[in-house]
Image: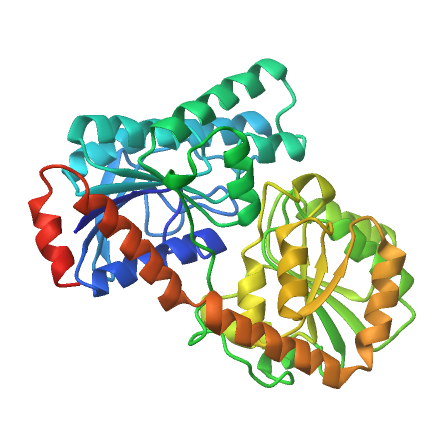
């Protein structure tokens, strides 16, 4: 099967979306498929091109058997509305010619956000007459409206019309959450063209490890009760609640908050921390991928956060790496969110609603000395991850979906023959 992926980011960018997409592409190559990936030049999270790359109109490389085509886009370190729109918009345009020059595939799979990237995928589908899967990682424009990024009614209507156009023209829509499925059903999308494939973690890479390790020693955390957040410091998070809890607990010498990552909120959070004199918070940049399992193991309890407005339009993928690490989850999330349901179902953590910093601080104090219960919740999460959210199992689901689409597409004899041998 010849697969064309189109997405905003790919390796070597080390954010969760890029890691998952890279793992899927590499695993499909290992299973005998030909994968071409059209993406932009690596620049996240600082809006600067990585060393060794140039922002050219077309460049090609091979990474772990995957043919990677990179096209030009507007890149800026500014995180305000118009620079981001220009970045997404220009790549969505250049991805079309990148995909066209890649050659005809048997199936196309494009990722949203950015939503306009689906237009390029749809045009390529029209040219080549092959099936097209629209993979939704977030619901746009709903998610952007929920966090206040989109407020202009005309712009919202424009993107809502684009959303409906793409949903009705995609051959299949792949979702990561049950809430996403309900959203699309409410918009009149046929249930038969919706496939739910969850986000995953690699249980062979991220495994339970000793807490007292080199990461703790390097960051002066030995002997502390570590409450860790690792991921994007973005607009959907409730990290202000974490700062509030840290303020309530700042006299406790044993509790340490560790916030790891980058994003539009980082400077604001660091400023707030300094203003409040919070010496019990460590802000760290994204850590190298090779120490990621050790970093996750250094936590006593790991945070996942989602604000009230984003409860039905986003699902932070970090929750699955926490489960894989065998650590309990402290979810700051609305009770109706997918996160809260997952934590409750798996009995792998505790949920506190957003904007309740005092309750969050009391929850941390109450579990601080419950070592056995924390260990039990961590083990429950690991078990659930192995059963439902492992890398191999989710890649199986993607492969089966793509093969099924190709088998039902006219004039796809090549894929029909391949499918018999997979």
Q: How many marks are shown on the rendered structure?
A: 0
Please state the horizontal and vertical placement of residue 300, each as a whole percent of the image: 70, 76
Seen in the picture, residue 303 relative to 268 is either above or below; the reply is below
Seen in the picture, residue 141 relative to 355 is either above or below; the reply is above
Q: Nearer the viewer, residue 233 or 326?
A: 326
Q: Is residue 59 visible?
A: yes
Quadrant of the drawing holding the C terminus: bottom left
Q: Is residue 66 left or right of residue 346?
A: left
Seen in the picture, residue 70 relative to 74 is either above or below; the reply is below
Q: Is residue 75 left or right of residue 109?
A: right
Write the residue at 71% across / 45% down: 307
Find the residue positioned furthest to the top: 154
Q: Nearer the viewer, residue 154 or 386?
A: 386
Write the residue at 48% across / 45% down: 137
Q: Is residue 161 left or right of residue 209?
A: left
Q: Is residue 298 visible?
A: no
Write the residue at 52% across / 29% down: 187
Please state the horizontal and vertical placement of residue 337, each as a whole percent of the image: 66, 49
Q: Nearer the viewer, residue 378 or 415?
A: 415
Please state the horizontal and vertical placement of residue 271, each as a whole percent of the image: 77, 48
Write the residue at 80% across / 53% down: 241
Q: Is residue 417 left or right of residue 295?
A: left
Please state the horizontal and vertical placement of residue 262, each as a whole percent of the image: 59, 52
Q: Nearer the viewer, residue 303 or 89?
A: 303
How was the colour assigned to the protein in this rendering?
A: rainbow
């Amino acid at each position: 099967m010849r697969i064309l992926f189109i997405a905003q980011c790919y390796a070597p960018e080390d954010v969760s979306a890029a890691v998952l997409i890279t793992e899927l592409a590499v695993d499909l190559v290992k299973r005998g498929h030909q994968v071409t990936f059209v993406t932009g030049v690596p620049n996240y999270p600082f809006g600067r091109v990585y060393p060794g790359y140039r922002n050219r109109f077309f460049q090609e490389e091979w990474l772990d058997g995957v043919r990677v085509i990179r096209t030009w886009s507007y890149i800026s370190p500014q995180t305000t509305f118009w620079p981001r729109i220009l970045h997404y918009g220009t790549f969505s345009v250049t991805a079309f010619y990148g995909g066209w020059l890649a050659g005809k595939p048997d199936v196309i799979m494009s990722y949203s956000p950015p939503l306009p990237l689906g237009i390029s995928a749809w045009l390529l589908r029209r040219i080549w007459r092959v099936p097209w899967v629209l993979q939704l990682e977030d619901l746009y424009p709903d998610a952007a409206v929920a966090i206040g990024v989109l407020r202009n009614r005309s712009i919202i209507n424009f993107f809502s019309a684009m959303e409906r156009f793409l949903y009705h023209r995609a051959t299949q829509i792949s979702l990561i959450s049950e809430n996403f499925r309900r959203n699309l059903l409410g918009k009149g999308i046929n249930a038969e063209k919706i496939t739910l494939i969850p986000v995953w973690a690699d249980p062979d890479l991220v495994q339970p490890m000793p807490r007292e390790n080199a990461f703790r020693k390097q960051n002066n955390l030995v002997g502390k009760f570590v409450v860790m957040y690792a991921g994007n410091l973005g607009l959907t998070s409730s990290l202000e609640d974490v700062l509030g809890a840290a303020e309530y607990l700042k006299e406790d010498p044993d509790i340490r908050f560790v916030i790891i990552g980058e994003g539009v909120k980082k400077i604001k959070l660091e400023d707030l921390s300094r203003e409040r004199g919070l010496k019990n918070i460590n802000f760290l940049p994204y850590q190298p991928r090779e120490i990621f399992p050790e970093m996750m193991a250094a936590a006593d309890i790991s945070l996942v956060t989602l604000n009230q407005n984003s409860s039905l339009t986003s699902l932070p993928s970090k929750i699955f790496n926490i489960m894989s690490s065998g650590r309990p989850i402290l979810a700051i999330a609305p009770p109706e969110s997918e996160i809260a349901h997952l934590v409750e179902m798996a009995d792998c953590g505790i949920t506190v609603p957003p904007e309740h910093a005092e309750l969050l601080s009391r929850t941390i104090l109450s579990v601080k000395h419950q070592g056995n219960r924390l260990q039990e919740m961590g083990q429950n999460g690991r078990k659930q991850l192995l059963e439902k959210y492992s890398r191999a199992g989710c890649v199986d689901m993607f492969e089966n979906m793509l093969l099924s689409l190709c088998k039902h597409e006219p004039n796809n004899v090549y894929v029909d023959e391949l499918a018999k041998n997979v």
